Image (tube, rainbow, N blue to C red):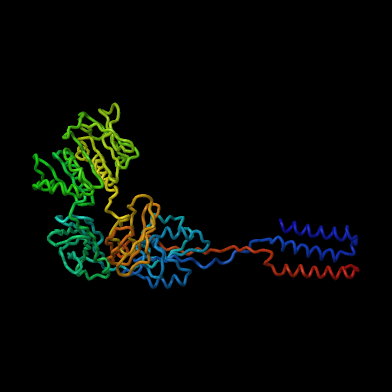
């Protein structure tokens, strides 16, 4: 349209000039035509008119090359995949959030979806080169693969014997026994048995034979006192003499802190059904050392595990140094000298509190830290509580559970929590909630979830001896970062850190995200760290990784789409248009000279 307008205006102006202003008529038709052509060319150049060019071949493909550790596992085809990817296009590694600084695979994950989402912004054809063992198959939708080609270099099946899982406590006390549970699996092998060894540095602490049958679990126990363990202990659980093709999945590290005092202490006086079920639930859900003491007879305390007699001084010391103190019945006097960050009080009349018996049905509170324990569960149909102690929440307290007498009347708070002076306190003013656990089913799930949520909230209280940040897990697999979580007061801020160990990462500070977490990438091996403002510890990066284990191929090969790109050109790129303008002006000048004009 603009081209047509320019042509019409150029012709009209030329006609007005020669026929109306200079009144030359048909004698000047050559000069008028030349001027119209020159003005049309100049008008197109001034407007810079653009138009599309025919579609042509697309740009060089963008090749997403799998940079996970599985590409270099035994049977992997990393060199072949890398060389092919370089021939096919521009190579970018994918697999994890860590920026890749070299061309070697070092990612502990094979996440493909983020790389595909980033490549979608490009108009270039995309080619994925992988062994097909990606870790986020559900996140890779068919729409994301619509214009993506896939070339697979699956690793060859190899015989392998591996430790697939290792669980155990993160913290024990000096008199505890460390209980490690290892899961061993054979791939392509059918051995009758294997031998597990637990090592501390070069010293073998325990040997244990494991009878295999596809996948086998073995439990290894280490009495702390017998082996003289103390402080931060980095244990290595190893498959001895495995003689398989992939030795890097034959050993795993486990870091356990041996402390002189327990993490959670429960005192019950006297022991009732609520106390027994609560102790059992705490033992099941807590990842901290647990000690329980009960007063069955006046003035005499016993352990809740073995009923072994203990002195009052031992009980008082445990209560004073616990992280979380649970007091059931007439044991509230031990709360005065405790340094615990969380205290769970459970009065039941022994201290002279008012008791109101009856059938009290629980009503969940809203907006409390324990509200998630009751989501989707019919709490009003759970067994009723047998009695309550009237309590009134203060300003700023949260109510996690209330109760109604025979499902009628007003709600009476029975579970409240408060945070004051750096300590968190929860009060449970109802008896009979043990019936939920005894009944089983959804009520038992709610009971365990309630105990876990309450304990988690109590542990979130400020610990004056703790650092501003702590590692979420002290041992991480190869190719994964050590994640630190902010524990200080106020909003997270950048925190300086110094690390000693072999193959240090480049990070010298922790930068926390909106969730209060920061990542630190380190080389395999143990590392001691020192945080700005105090706080130190031991972390380790294992040589073990899930990437070493054979996994199913979840990608299938797809041809690379033949993309074409439609180009755009402008009138100022047309050199011939400049020539037409110059030639037309020259012709007009000659024609005007013949007419005797300037």
The residue at the point 24 percent across, 59 percent down is 166
The residue at the point 81 percent across, 64 percent down is 35
Q: In which quarter of the image is the N terminus?
A: bottom right
- State whether residue 544 appears in this view: no
Label tally? 0
Q: Where is residue 432 in the image (x, y as percent from the top left)?
A: 20, 35
**The image quarter in which residue 33 lies:** bottom right
The residue at the point 84 percent across, 59 percent down is 15
Q: Quick one: 374 or 502, which is closer to the camera?
A: 502
Q: Quick one: 13 or 242, which is closer to the camera?
A: 13
Q: Quadrant of the C terminus?
A: bottom right
Please state if 383 lies on the left or on the right of 563 as rendered: left
Q: Position of residue 350 (x, y in %)?
A: 16, 35
Q: Position of residue 84 (x, y in %)?
A: 43, 71
211 shown above or below 455 = below
- State whether residue 30 appears in this view: yes
**The image quarter in which residue 65 lies:** bottom left
Q: Where is residue 34 in the image (x, y as percent from the top left)?
A: 81, 66
440 shown above or below 503 = above
**The image quarter in which residue 418 lies:** top left
Please state if 287 lies on the left or on the right of 97 as rendered: left
Q: Residue furthest top?
A: 409
Please state if 251 lies on the left or on the right of 468 as rendered: left
Q: Quick one: 341 or 100, which is closer to the camera?
A: 341
353 shown above or below 218 = above
């Amino acid at each position: 349209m603009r081209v047509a307008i320019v042509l019409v205006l150029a012709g009209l102006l030329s006609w007005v000039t020669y026929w109306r202003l200079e009144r030359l008529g048909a004698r000047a038709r050559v000069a008028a035509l030349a001027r119209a052509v020159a003005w049309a060319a100049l008008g197109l150049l001034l407007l810079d008119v653009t138009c599309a060019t025919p579609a042509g071949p697309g740009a060089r493909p963008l090749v997403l090359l799998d940079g996970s550790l599985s590409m270099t596992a035994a049977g992997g085809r990393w060199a072949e995949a890398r060389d092919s990817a370089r021939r096919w296009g521009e190579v970018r590694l994918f697999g994890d959030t860590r920026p890749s600084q070299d061309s070697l695979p070092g990612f502990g994950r094979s996440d493909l979806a983020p790389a595909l989402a980033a490549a979608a912004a490009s108009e270039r054809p995309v080619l994925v080169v992988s062994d097909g063992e990606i870790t986020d198959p559900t996140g890779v939708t068919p729409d994301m693969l619509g214009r993506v080609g896939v070339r697979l270099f699956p690793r060859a099946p190899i015989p392998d014997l591996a430790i697939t899982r290792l669980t155990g406590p993160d913290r024990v006390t000096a008199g505890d026994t460390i209980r490690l549970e290892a899961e061993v699996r054979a791939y392509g092998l059918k051995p009758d048995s294997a031998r597990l060894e637990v090592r501390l540095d070069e010293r073998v602490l325990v040997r244990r034979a494991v009878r295999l049958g596809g996948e086998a679990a073995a439990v290894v126990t280490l009495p702390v006192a017998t082996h003289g363990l103390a402080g931060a202990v980095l244990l290595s659980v190893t498959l001895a003499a495995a003689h398989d093709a992939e030795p890097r999945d034959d050993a795993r590290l486990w870091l356990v802190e041996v402390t002189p005092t327990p993490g959670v202490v429960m005192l019950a006086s006297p022991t009732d059904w609520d106390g027994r079920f609560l102790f059992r639930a705490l033992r099941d859900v807590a990842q901290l050392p647990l000690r329980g003491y009960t007063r069955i007879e006046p003035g005499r305390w016993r352990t809740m595990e073995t009923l072994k007699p203990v002195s009052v001084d031992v009980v008082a010391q445990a209560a004073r140094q616990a992280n979380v103190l649970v007091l059931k019945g007439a044991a509230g006097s031990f709360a005065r000298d405790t340094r615990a960050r969380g205290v769970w009080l459970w009065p039941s009349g022994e201290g002279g509190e008012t008791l109101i018996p009856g059938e009290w049905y629980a009503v969940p509170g809203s907006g409390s830290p324990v509200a998630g324990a009751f989501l989707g569960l019919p709490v009003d149909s759970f067994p009723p509580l047998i009695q309550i102690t009237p309590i009134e929440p203060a300003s700023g307290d949260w109510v996690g559970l209330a109760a109604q007498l025979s499902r009628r009347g007003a709600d009476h708070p029975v579970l409240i929590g408060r945070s004051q002076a750096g300590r968190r306190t929860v009060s449970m003013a109802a008896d009979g909630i043990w019936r939920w656990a005894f009944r089983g089913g959804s009520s038992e799930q709610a009971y365990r979830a309630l105990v876990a949520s309450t304990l988690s909230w109590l542990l979130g209280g400020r610990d004056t001896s703790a650092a501003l940040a702590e590692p979420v897990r002290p041992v991480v697999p190869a190719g994964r970062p050590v994640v630190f979580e902010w524990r200080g007061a106020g909003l997270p801020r950048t925190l300086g850190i110094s690390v000693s160990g072999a193959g240090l990462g480049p990070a010298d500070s922790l930068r926390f995200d909106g969730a209060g977490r920061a990542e630190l990438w380190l080389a395999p091996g143990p590392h001691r760290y020192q945080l700005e403002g105090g706080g130190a510890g031991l972390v380790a990066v294992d040589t073990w990784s899930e990437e070493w284990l054979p996994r199913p191929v979840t990608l299938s090969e797809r041809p690379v789409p033949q993309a074409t790109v439609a180009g755009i050109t402008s009138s100022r790129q047309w050199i011939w248009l400049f020539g037409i303008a110059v030639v037309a002006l020259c012709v007009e000048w000659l024609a005007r000279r013949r007419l005797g004009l300037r």
